[in-house]
Structures are given as C-alpha cells and as structure tokens.
C-alpha cells in the first residue's frame, strides 16, 4: 500500500504534458534525397532534427519515471547538436504581439553565397492531410504530384549577404565568418512560378505575396518565434513558428483565415558521386489549431516531412 501511495504521489507531481505520447514526427533521419540527375541518393548517415522542448517534443510518462529513478541520462540520445541560439520556444505560441528579435535570421555558411538548384521531395504526410496541403500551398508549394511525393519539385534558390542589421557571424575552424541568408522573396517567386512578392532582408520575419497565375488571393507570412543553430562542422538550421494568413473564400467572402505552422530545417555539407559539393537538408512542417490568436503547439494537426538537396547549377 505504501508503495502504491508513493507511485501515485510521483505521478501527481508530473506535468500534464508528461502523459502525451511524443509525436511520431519528432525525428527525421535516414530519408532519401534525389541527386541532380534525378536518381536516388542516400545520405552518408541519418541527419536528425534535434529534440528540444521548444520544438514541441514531450517526454512520455515512462521516460519521466525513468528520470525519477536516476536513469534520465540514458532516456534518449541524439546525434546532432541542439539549436545553439535563440530563446526557448514556449509550448503555446501567440501569433500576435510577440517581440521577435529583428536582428535575427536563419544563418547559412558563407560558402552558400549565390545561386543553387533546390530539389524538394515530400517523404511523409501524417495527420490532417487537408491542413497540411493548405499550409504547403501557402508557403509556396504547388498542388498535385509534388505534395503527394509522386514528383520532385525543382526550382532555383539564392543566398545573399546578410544585411548589416542581421547577426550573421559564426566561428568555423577557429575563424570568424560572415554567414549568408536565404533570399525568401526569390524562393517564393521561383516556387510559385511567378508572384508579386514583398520582402525585405533587413526585416526577414515578414513576407507577403500574390501568385501571378490563378485566382489565389494574397498570402501573409509572419515569423512569430525563431530559434537558430549557427553553422558548424556538424551542420546548421533553425526552427520558426509562423502565422500564415490567407483569404477565407467560399461562404465567408473576403474574410481571412489565420493558420499556424512550425517549420524546422536542418542542413549539412556533403559530396555527390562525382565529388562535387552539395547540401543535404531535412524539413519538418507541423500545423496547429489556432484559438483566439494562440497556436496549440502541444498537439500538431499534421506533420509533413521533406527531403531537401541543393546543388550548384551547371
């Protein structure tokens, strides 16, 4: 009886989130990428997204009990470094009124400066596929075979010097380097096959666009929370919680719909079969319900996993 009371007492001390099973999308590793020739390319080893509290990872009840028993150090092992900079992201994300650091953006190695060819392949969609498809399209994707993973999406991407107002320095091999940033406006225009885009690299957290073709209304994307892992020999990446505003359409007329999505990306340097330098990446996009301007980031409604590959154009 005394033992049972002790166990109950320990369980009452645990937070409610301890009894949520970790989502199956917590890690993304060993995914297949595609070479510039269109043939499958297997990375040298699994490239994992780190498990951090701000990335909506929750330990299960059994893991907590092992921690209480003194075995917490062996609960989980990760092969990649934690996001090195940026404030921890809370479980719930408010989509308005957040004070985002205007001097922060996702920093890429200086060697990426210039134009690349980006290849994207959807490897998995879990949960509400309808919500996943809506966010996929709002973030620049195209409908049909590319979202279902039956076709590879290919488009040009460009990295530019970071503006003076953006913190971009990092240390590599003992040398201080000036990183570069993704030209987000150029990417949206390329992915949508033509769009009117409003984006300023000195304020990278806000982007608006409208496709040049079709009847799609304007889309507004705002970064609400951001965490950055600066480049190192092990890789680089970041996590951004986004507010995505689109037209409601249909019976709601000209109203707007606000959605929330977290985009996590991680990259590493690699070589192709000919010894050319390439960049391999993994992307996880999670969607969330939004109530009164707050995203319920404890429980994603969908998860989309994407394999990324960057090669220099011929």
Image (cartoon, rainbow, N blue to C red):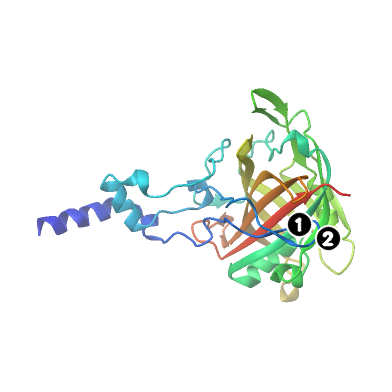
- Image mark for residue 35: 1
- Asked if the residues shown at circle 2 and circle 1 are in contact, with their CB atoms under 8 angstroms apart, the answer is no
Q: Is residue 235 above or below residue 41?
A: above
Report the residue at 77% width, 39% height from top.
Answer: 112
- Seen as rendered, the residue at the extreme bottom is 251
- Image mark for residue 192: 2
Badge 1: how crowded within 10 Å, few (<14), some, or many (20+)?
A: some
Give the camera-side residue of 150 and 302.
150
Give the camera-side residue of 153 and 88.
153
Give the camera-side residue of 278 and 240.
278
Report x, y in % for residue 101.
Answer: 64, 36
Point out the tag, 2 or 1, that comes first from the N-terminus.
1
- Seen as rendered, the residue at the extreme left is 1
Badge 2: how crowded within 10 Å, few (<14), some, or many (20+)?
A: many
Report x, y in % for residue 48.
Answer: 56, 50
Q: Is residue 13 above or below residue 142?
A: above
Q: Secondary structure at mark 1?
A: loop
Report x, y in % for residue 244.
Answer: 69, 57
Q: Is residue 249 left or right of residue 91?
A: right
Position of the N terminus, as image quadrant, is: bottom left
Mark 2 or 1: the one toward you = 1
Q: Is residue 248 above or below residue 309?
A: below
The reply to whether residue 55 is visible in this rendering is: yes
The reply to whether residue 167 is visible in this rendering is: no
Q: Secondary structure at mark 2?
A: loop
Report the residue at 28% width, 50% height from top.
Answer: 13
Report x, y in % for residue 274.
Answer: 78, 49
């Amino acid at each position: 009886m005394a033992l049972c009371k002790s166990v109950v007492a320990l369980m009452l001390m645990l937070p409610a989130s301890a009894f949520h099973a970790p989502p199956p999308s917590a890690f993304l590793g060993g995914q297949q990428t595609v070479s510039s020739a269109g043939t499958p390319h297997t990375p040298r080893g699994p490239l994992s997204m780190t498990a951090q509290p701000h990335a909506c990872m929750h330990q299960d009840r059994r893991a907590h009990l092992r921690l209480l028993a003194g075995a917490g150090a062996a609960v989980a092992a990760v092969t990649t470094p934690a996001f090195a900079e940026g404030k921890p992201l809370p479980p719930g994300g408010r989509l308005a009124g957040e004070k985002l650091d205007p001097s922060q953006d996702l920093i890429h190695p200086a060697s990426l400066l210039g134009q690349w060819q980006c290849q994207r392949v959807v490897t998995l969609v879990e949960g509400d596929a309808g919500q996943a498809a809506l966010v996929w399209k709002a973030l620049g994707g195209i409908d049909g075979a590319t979202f279902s993973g039956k076709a590879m999406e290919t488009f040009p991407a460009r990295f530019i010097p970071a503006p003076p107002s953006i913190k971009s320095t990092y240390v590599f091999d003992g040398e201080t380097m000036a990183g570069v940033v993704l030209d987000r406006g150029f990417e949206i225009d390329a992915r949508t096959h033509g769009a009117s885009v409003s984006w300023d690299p000195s304020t990278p957290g806000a982007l608006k666009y409208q496709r040049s073709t079709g009847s799609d209304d304007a889309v507004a994307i705002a970064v609400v929370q951001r965490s950055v892992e600066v480049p190192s020999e092990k890789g680089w990446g970041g996590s951004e919680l986004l507010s995505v505003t689109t037209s409601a359409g249909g019976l709601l007329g000209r109203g707007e719909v606000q959605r929330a999505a977290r985009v996590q990306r991680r990259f590493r340097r690699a070589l192709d079969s000919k010894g050319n330098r390439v960049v391999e990446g993994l992307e996880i996009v999670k969607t969330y319900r939004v109530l009164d301007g707050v995203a319920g980031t404890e429980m994603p409604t969908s998860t989309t996993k994407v394999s990324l590959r960057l090669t220099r154009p011929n």
